[in-house]
């Protein structure tokens, strides 16, 4: 399990996305430099890429990122010598912790960031990784700071 680091600027971009889609869940991709993925230490998120919530039911409690959207995000990242290392989504009016649905649909290795959001704004942020053996989410340390960031939200 790897700790995660992201800049305040990227956090604000995710929070803005969560506020803009409230009361529905927002979702998107977390991007890191390819070179940092082989290094020891925290996973350095250098960009976030908002994505459409493609869930066909109640988007207030569910999100869906389609496989073709992930492939497109991976291709865009590869052009910049970066890699998709995880996903973020919001939990409107619920804690910043993965739900059992989130856990059932998660993949090991990826980082999952969950943002709490209410009508009053975005609040808590939690960082998680799926343990491949137990198939349960484990909270990972989250550092907010400059680090090795590209410093922008990818659009």
Image (cartoon, rainbow, N blue to C red):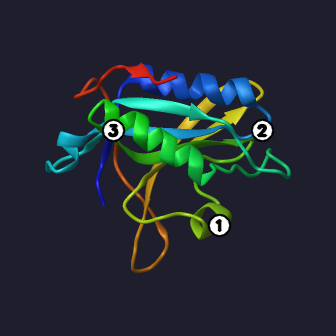
Q: Nearer the viewer, mark 1 or mark 2?
A: 2
- Tell me how far mark 1 sits from mark 2, CA to CA: 18 Å
What mark, if any, has residue 24 been given in the picture?
Answer: 2
59 with respect to 86 (left or right): right
Contact between labelled residues 1 and 3, with CB atoms less than 8 Å apart: no
Helix, strand or loop under label 1: helix
Identify residue for label 3.
78
From the viewer's perspective, is residue 125 above or below residue 18? below
- Tell me how far mark 2 sits from mark 3, CA to CA: 30 Å
* Viewer-nearest residue: 95 or 25: 25
154 with respect to 21 (left or right): left
From the viewer's perspective, is residue 141 above or below residue 46? below
Residue pictured at 24% horizontal, 42% vertical: 34
Does residue 114 appear in the picture of this structure?
Answer: no
From the viewer's perspective, is residue 125 above or below residue 61? above
- Tell me how far mark 3 sits from mark 1, CA to CA: 32 Å
Contact between labelled residues 2 and 1, with CB atoms less than 8 Å apart: no
Helix, strand or loop under label 2: loop
Tell which circle, 1 or 2, labels the residue nearer the N-terminal end. 2
Can you name the residue that lies furthest to the bottom here? 133
Identify residue for label 1.
100
Residue pictured at 75% horizontal, 41% vertical: 93
Q: How many marks?
A: 3
């Amino acid at each position: 399990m790897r700790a995660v680091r992201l800049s305040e600027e990227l956090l604000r971009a995710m929070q803005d996305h969560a506020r803009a889609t409230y009361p529905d869940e927002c979702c998107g991709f977390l991007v890191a430099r390819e070179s940092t993925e082989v290094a020891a230490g925290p996973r350095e998120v250098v960009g976030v890429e908002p994505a459409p919530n493609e869930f066909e039911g109640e988007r207030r409690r569910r999100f869906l990122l389609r496989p073709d959207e992930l492939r497109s995000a991976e291709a865009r990242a590869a052009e910049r010598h970066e890699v998709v290392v995880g996903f973020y989504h919001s939990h409107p009016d619920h804690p910043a912790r993965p739900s059992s649905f989130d856990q059932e649909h998660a993949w090991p290795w990826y980082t999952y960031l969950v943002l709490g959001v209410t009508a009053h704004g975005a609040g808590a942020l939690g960082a998680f990784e799926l343990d491949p053996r137990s198939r349960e989410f484990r909270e990972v340390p989250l550092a907010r700071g400059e680090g090795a960031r590209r410093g922008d939200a990818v659009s």
